Image: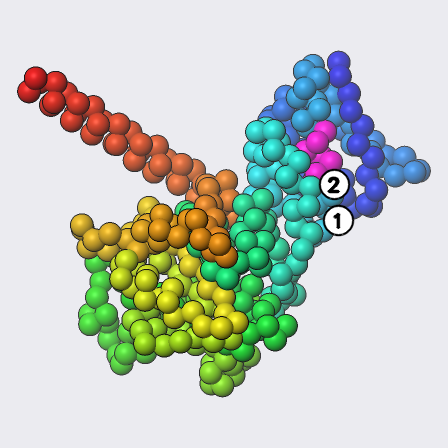
Amino acid sequence: MNRKIIKMEHTDATAKIFGSFDANARRIERQFNVTLRNRESETGDSIIIEGEDEALVEQAARCVSYLHELSAKTEVITDQSLQYALDMIAAGQDRELASLGDACICVTTRGKPVKAKTVGQQKYIEMIRKNTIVLGVGPAGTGKTFLAVAMAVKALREKQITRIILTRPAIEAGEKLGFLPGDLQSKIDPYLRPLYDALFEMLGAETYQRLVEKGTIEIAPLAYMRGRTLDDSFIILDEAQNATPEQMKMFLTRLGFNSKAVVTGDLTQTDLPKGQKSGLGAAVKILENIDDIGIHYFTDRDVVRHHLVQKIIQAYEKYDRDLARREAERKAAAVKKKI
């Protein structure tokens, strides 16, 4: 029997690691085929890890050690945080977890610190810091827009910029602006709602409204960007997979002095008419070798929503791969038949 002992330096660390009704401990035990026990003493708690396989015991110990460090930075270890740690350690990438969650971007109105929850998110944040233009590409739930808005609010609070400008293409599956009731503002509001939500979280409704009235924050459809030069601004283009190549070029050339632009989108969820190319898809190819432009690709591992979202994304990716394989086999068979 192999054994590892992890001493708990934080008084409430053991309870956080084991989780409610020891749910976290049970998941660690199943993942690494080990047994976890808590040992109390006058000098503090320890977690004892035992198992037949030495390598798995070592992995479980690294997982517990990481969760111990995480427990000092957060009130509770969430299902997502635990699953991410399990996946990273099982893949041999636990070294990248070391500094995760150290830097706080900003604090929400509810006093919640906004931090990177995955290594992918941390690299994305660092890329935004270092580059003038960043393209964040990946599936839903990876924090592309939320983190970009957090970085914009941070830049505004630190007086690095004087305006935040957020925009989206007013395109959705099966709907047109003209079908919606109300004036133009009422028509475009549903398309921009995710941006409102992120700003409300960071600033609060009253502060947000005041900044909008002063012109410090502007939210508008992508078409409204034409003909403008945007200086001293943090500009975010959301849902960029629904922008045409012409719109993408128009947006990127609006950039003025002392400005930063972040473009986010998911190339698997394009709502453009059939046959129309995505401007985001073209941009990641055209701009990939230009200095001061960063391109970050998120994966399903970076999903920070409900764990089922990650499984749904993986299922759709598998379906698309199988569909492409069958189509390639069909075409090969047709060519062979002609020969």
Q: Nearer the viewer, residue 296 or 86?
A: 296
- The rendered magenta stretch, by its main secondary structure, is classed as helix
Amino acid type at image mark 2 = His
Q: Nearer the viewer, residue 180 or 95?
A: 95
Query: Residue 321 falls in which quadrant of the image?
Result: top left
Task: Say whether residue 66 is magenta.
Answer: yes
Q: Is residue 286 above or below residue 253?
A: above
Side (left or right) of 105 relative to 291:
right
Q: Is residue 30 above or below residue 147?
A: above
Q: Position of residue 63 (x, y in %)?
A: 68, 33
Residue pictured at 43% horizontal, 75% vertical: 230
Q: Is residue 88 above or below residue 188?
A: above
Q: Which mark is on residue 68?
A: 2
Q: Classify 10 Å Cα crowding around label 1: few (below 14), some (14-19), many (20 and above).
A: some
Helix, strand or loop at disc 1?
A: loop
Query: Residue 241 falls in which quadrant of the image?
Result: bottom left
